[in-house]
């Protein structure tokens, strides 16, 4: 993680203003930070030092079970809060967040702002709306797993998880996330490859026909 200094800090604060989410002056507290691809924003079992507001890039949320199995939970895209549950519950980070692309965040130090945040009606109102939308999105995902063919769901997944048209997620994690068998997943990947939508690469797949992929995702 790298903290940005002036003039870059001011550039991002002007580009992504969030003052309206708070009733107190939040700008003096905000730091702007960037994470490289593959870097951890939160590690499992760690204590949160910042409430992050993701403004650029994508990250994935997952958990490691006691038996060593990893479950992919969701992909996070800008704009979104990260660490809000831990702010409210005062607990360690139970899930990991790792970047999929280069990520830029507005970081609010919890130790300096916690009391202000938890007594700010404006912020808590926006946070409630955000958590409601988050729950609705998760519910919709599980519903889609029941009613849409895998080719449509996989197309959407490739688009949301790819970095500059390159996709490299692990098949085992994707199978669990989409609720399908490994064999079925490979069959659909082969079909998309045959149709020229994607192309197999040694480390993953290259998106060759983004328009077709977007049509399938819709």
Image (tube, grey):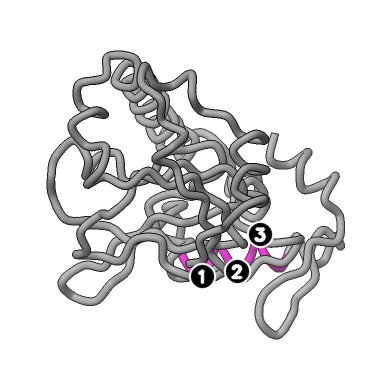
| Residue 185 percent coordinates (x, y) | 56, 63
Image quadrant occupied by the C terminus: top right
Nearer the N terminus, badge 2 or badge 1?
1
User: Relative to residue 9, is residue 170 drawn left or right?
Assistant: left
Res 186 label: 2
- Report which residue position mark 1 lands on: 171
| Residue 164 percent coordinates (x, y) | 75, 61
Secondary structure category for the residue under label 2: helix
- Report which residue position mark 3 lands on: 162
Q: Residues within 10 Å of mark 3 (few under 14, many from 20)?
A: some
Query: Mark 2 and mark 3: span between their CA atoms?
Result: 17 Å
Residue 217 lies in quadrant: top right
Q: Are marks 2 and 3 in contact (CB under 8 Å)?
A: no
- Please state which of the two labelled residues, at mark 2 or mark 1, is closer to the viewer: 1
Q: Nearer the viewer, residue 3 or 95?
A: 3
User: Relative to residue 167, is residue 52 drawn left or right?
Assistant: left
Residue 153 in the magenta stretch? The answer is no
Q: Residues within 10 Å of mark 2 (few under 14, many from 20)?
A: few
Q: Are marks 2 and 1 in contact (CB under 8 Å)?
A: yes
Nearer the N terminus, badge 2 or badge 3?
3
User: Relative to residue 56, is residue 212 drawn left or right?
Assistant: right
Q: Residues within 10 Å of mark 1 (few under 14, many from 20)?
A: few
Query: Mark 3 and mark 1: span between their CA atoms?
Result: 14 Å
Q: Nearer the viewer, residue 23 or 99?
A: 23
Magenta segment = 181-190
Nearer the N terminus, badge 3 or badge 1?
3
Residue 13 lies in quadrant: top right
Going 44% across and 31% down the picture, which residue do you hit? 137
Query: Mark 2 and mark 1: span between their CA atoms?
Result: 8 Å
């Amino acid at each position: 993680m790298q903290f940005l200094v002036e003039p870059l800090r001011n550039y991002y604060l002007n580009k992504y203003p969030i003052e309206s989410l708070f009733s107190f002056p939040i700008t003096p507290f905000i730091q702007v930070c960037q994470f490289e691809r593959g870097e951890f924003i939160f590690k499992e079992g760690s204590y949160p030092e910042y409430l992050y507001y993701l403004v650029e890039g994508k990250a994935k949320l997952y958990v490691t079970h006691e038996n060593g199995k990893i479950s992919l939970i969701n992909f996070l895209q800008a704009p979104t809060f990260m660490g809000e549950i831990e702010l409210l519950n005062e607990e360690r980070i139970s899930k990991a967040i790792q970047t999929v692309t280069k990520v830029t965040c507005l970081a609010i130090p919890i130790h300096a702002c916690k009391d202000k945040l938890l007594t700010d009606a404006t912020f808590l109102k926006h946070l409630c709306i955000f958590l409601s939308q988050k729950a609705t999105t998760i519910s919709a995902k599980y519903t889609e797993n029941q009613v849409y063919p895998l080719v449509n769901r996989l197309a959407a997944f490739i688009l949301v998880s790819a970095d500059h048209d390159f996709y490299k997620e692990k098949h085992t994690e994707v199978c669990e996330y989409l609720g399908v068998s490994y064999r079925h997943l490979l069959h659909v990947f082969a079909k998309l490859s045959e149709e020229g939508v994607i192309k197999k690469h040694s480390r993953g797949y290259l998106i060759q026909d983004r328009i077709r992929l977007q049509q399938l995702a819709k």
